[in-house]
Structure formats: C-alpha cells, structure tokens
C-alpha cells in the first residue's frame, strides 16, 4: 500500500503493478481500509487492522497490516529511505 498526502493506492504481487486487475485506490479508516480495484470500481472490500497475519504470510517490514481473514492481506511497509 502506498500512502502519500491524502491519496492511498495499493498493488498486488509487485510494488508497482499497475495492471487494472491488480491495482486500485483505498480509503483509510481508524481500524479499517477499504480497497477498490481499478478494473472493478463497483466492488470494494473492507479489511480490518490486525497485529499479525498468524503465519499465513510473511511481511517482515510491515508497520501496519489489514486483512479480510481469508483472501486479502495488505500491509504498509516502512520506507527504505527512512532507515
């Protein structure tokens, strides 16, 4: 997930994947994030914030994590430039 100023975007499988089926926008809530794919703007998925993916997926640099508990695992990584 990429967050800059007031915009939020996500991509699947690759950091800069701009395939409409694997890329979209997001809206951050207090403990949720709603993602919408470019290819399917009528379909949105709401994910909840979690502390851990319980071993389902590795995300060593994640500073925040969200999931629907089944299919979608989204995380925000620390900027490489921040170190």
Image (tube, rainbow, N blue to C red):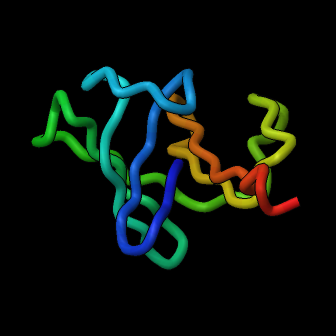
Residue at the spot 21% in from the left edge and 35% down from the top edge: 38
In percent of width and height, residue 50 lies at 68, 58
Q: Image quarter for residue 8?
A: bottom left
The C terminus: image quadrant? bottom right
Residue at the spot 61% in from the left edge and 61% down from the top edge: 49
- Judging depth in this view, the residue of 72 and 61 nearest the camera is 61
Residue at the spot 53% in from the left edge and 58% down from the top edge: 48
Lateral position of residue 75 relative to residue 72, left or right: right
Q: In this view, does 19 lie above or below 56?
A: above
Q: Image quarter for residue 43?
A: top left
Residue farthest front in this picture: 81
Q: How many labels does the image show?
A: 0
Residue farthest bottom in this picture: 30
In percent of width and height, residue 75 lies at 63, 48
Lateral position of residue 40 relative to residue 7, left or right: left
Residue at the spot 84% in from the left edge and 33% down from the top edge: 55
- Judging depth in this view, the residue of 31 and 17 nearest the camera is 17
Q: Is residue 23 above or below residue 34?
A: above
Q: In this view, does 21 lie above or below 43?
A: above
Q: Image quarter for residue 60?
A: top right
Lateral position of residue 17 relative to residue 42, left or right: right
- Judging depth in this view, the residue of 27 and 32 nearest the camera is 27
In percent of width and height, residue 79 lies at 72, 55
In percent of width and height, residue 71 lies at 51, 29
């Amino acid at each position: 997930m990429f967050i800059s100023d007031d915009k939020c975007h996500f991509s699947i499988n690759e950091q800069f994947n701009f395939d409409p089926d694997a890329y979209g926008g997001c809206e951050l809530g207090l403990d949720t994030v709603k993602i919408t794919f470019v290819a399917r703007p009528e379909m949105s998925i709401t994910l909840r914030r979690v502390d851990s993916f319980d071993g389902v997926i590795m995300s060593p640099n994640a500073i925040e994590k969200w999931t629907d508990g089944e299919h979608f695992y989204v995380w925000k990584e620390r900027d490489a430039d921040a170190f």
